[in-house]
Image (cartoon, rainbow, N blue to C red):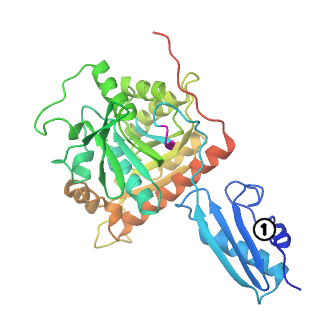
Amino acid sequence: MAITQAQIIDALRTVQDPDLKQDLVTLNMIKDVSAEGNKVAFTVELTTPACPLKEIIRRDCEAAVRKVGGDDLELDINMTSNVTSVRKIAQVLPGVKNIIAVASGKGGVGKSTVSANLAVALAKQGAKVGLIDADIFGPSMPTMFNCEHEQPGIKQVDGKNLIVPIEQYGVKLISIGLLTPQEGAVVWRGPMASSALRQFMADTEWGELDYMLIDLPPGTSDIHLTLVQTVPVTGAVVVTTPQKVALADARKGLAMFKQPQINVPVLGIVENMAWFTPEELPENKYYIFGENGGQRFADENNLPLLGQIPLVQGIRESGDNGYPAVLKDDVTSTAFEELAQTVARRVAIRNAEKPATQKVEMNA
């Protein structure tokens, strides 16, 4: 007896998304079910193209359907994705599904390196990604993306001039470093820097994006407040090193997002420079800044450790050369790819479990 569409759907009710803890049918992740004789086809729509559990879910679906229909079924399982979002259509960044702030308590912990490689890794895995270099006084993204000599375009839409971001390595990018002379210093008061950030968000043609990353300056400043007052932020990623001094400052950055009037969900902690690994000895680890400081910090604050990025000479060289390390084939590439997958999972879990973040309203 041939298997029916109803039997296929019932079988797939037994398959859970490992992160969201519900079955795929309830989550509306099963599409286009068809059954003709012993030929069965359906689509599984994942919550992100960067899903590391894709093969596990596919195997579980196959096992569930074969349990009902037998081993002689011809199965065609199409794995696609549709990134989740809890953002409502908004005036600012209307086509962006998720806005992720990348922050650190202090400078020098590699926050911009993490932002650049995270953005490229997400794009590499099939997501539509944008990146705003919000470090107005110390922009580094033009160098990291090898586009110091390029300038964004201008496009008129409905009588309004919009900035057209640079696109490099699959990532749409805007930075003050693309708009000012390379040898010049940006000597602005806080309100001017905040105005630049608002323009990057409201007056730039970003189009449809799955993830918008905001590379924030170190510490807590007007820029941070401008961000949360301009758009509802999906979540924040806090970057630190294992070093005690860095962790002390990371606590301050974390505390800012947790303030009741700001209340931005923190997706987790990234421990950068977790250990030093010589490229010629990839199995060796030297904990020159301390060991597992990021893990302890995450545990103390009941947050996940999103990833540990080793300190390798090639990361610095890649940043200077404008070719992000994640595009290479080595230990750092793997670390950044795994970080991207984990961040994408945390965004999907956050969107399933928490309500949409609201813009911060503050009285002067």
Question: Residue at (68%, 43%) from the top-left corner?
Answer: 353
Residue 325 x/y as whole percent? 31, 61
**Residue that carries the numbered disc 1 in the rendered image:** 12
Q: How many marks?
A: 1
For this orientation, the residue located farthest to the bottom is 72
Q: Quadrant of residue 200?
A: top left
210 relative position to 313: left or right: right
Image quarter in which the C terminus is found: top left
134 relative position to 146: left or right: right
Q: Nearer the viewer, residue 197 or 103?
A: 197
Can the viewer see residue 296 in this picture? Answer: yes
Can the viewer see residue 107 in this picture? Answer: no
213 relative position to 48: left or right: left
Magenta-colored stretch includes residue 185: no
Residue 303 x/y as whole percent? 58, 44
Q: Quadrant of residue 320?
A: bottom left
Q: Nearer the viewer, residue 93 or 118?
A: 93
Which stretch appears magenta?
A: 94-98
